[in-house]
Image: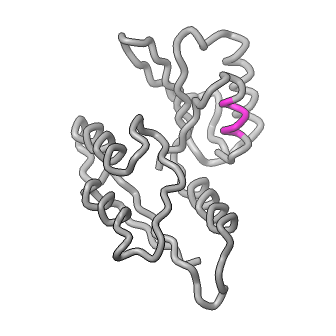
Amino acid sequence: MIPKGSQRAGGQQLATHLSNEFDNYRVVVAQVRGAVAQDLHGAFAEWSATAQGTRCRKYLYSLSVNPDPEQGPLTREQYLDFIDRAEEKLAQQLCIRIRSEEATPDRLTAMRQLLQARPGDCAVTLHVVIPDESETVIAVSAVRGVRPDETLRRDLDALFGRVVSELAL
């Protein structure tokens, strides 16, 4: 695989380019995470709106992955595995977003144990949401850092019975 990454703005132009079957050999949107919208244009518009509330100018990280001719063709599974490993390696923060009523002592203790069992370099933030009122972001200081692999994210999601974990680059 030949990866090429860049930080950029211009989400709508990128969404149009990525969706363009004329310039791209094959277009498959495997997954959209971290947005309500499940299409590229909608998700990129959400992220642009979030960035406008900050000083962030280049709010997207784009990773292009092309096959290496010397390696030969890869299966879809190999390709997706490469993307997962790149995401884990590039992740700078694991965000855990829960509703205030989910923040029981037992669940928070179990969450801390899950995080401490996977030490690494990725920072952890806990977002506690009171619906229709506020969101409080807490840096989890009890954990110096985690290795945010798929197993950890799956275990956190299972603990709360829904998707609560997200990697931020």
Residue 48 on image: x %, y %: 27, 44
Residue furthest toward the front?
A: 22
Q: In this figure, what is the number of numbered marks?
A: 0
Q: Closer to the camera, 85 or 15?
A: 15
Position of residue 165 in the picture relative to residue 154 (left or right): left
Q: Quadrant of residue 35?
A: top left
x, y percentage for residue 91? Answer: 54, 51
Q: Is residue 154 magenta?
A: yes
In the image shown, does 14 or 120 lie closer to the viewer? Answer: 14
Q: Quadrant of residue 54?
A: top left
Say which residue appears at 59% left-offset and 31% top-offset: 163
| Position of 103 relative to 154 (above/below) | above
Left of 21 or right of it: where is 144? right
Q: Is residue 143 left or right of residue 6?
A: right
**Which residue appears at 33% of the width and 44% of the height?**
42
> The N terminus lies in which quarter of the figure?
bottom right
Dividing the picture into quadrants, the one containing residue 109 is: top right
Q: Specify whether residue 20 is painted magenta.
A: no
Q: Which residues are magenta?
A: 152-157
Q: Residue at x 68, y 31 (%)?
A: 156
Q: Residue at x 24, y 51 (%)?
A: 57
| Image: 61 above or below 109 | below
Spot occupied by residue 11 in the image (x, y as percentages of width and height): 29, 54
Give the overall secondary structure of the magenta segment: helix
Q: Nearer the viewer, residue 25 or 1?
A: 25
The scheme the figure's colours follow is: one colour
Residue closer to the observer: 18 or 95: 18
Q: Is residue 100 above or below residue 147?
A: above
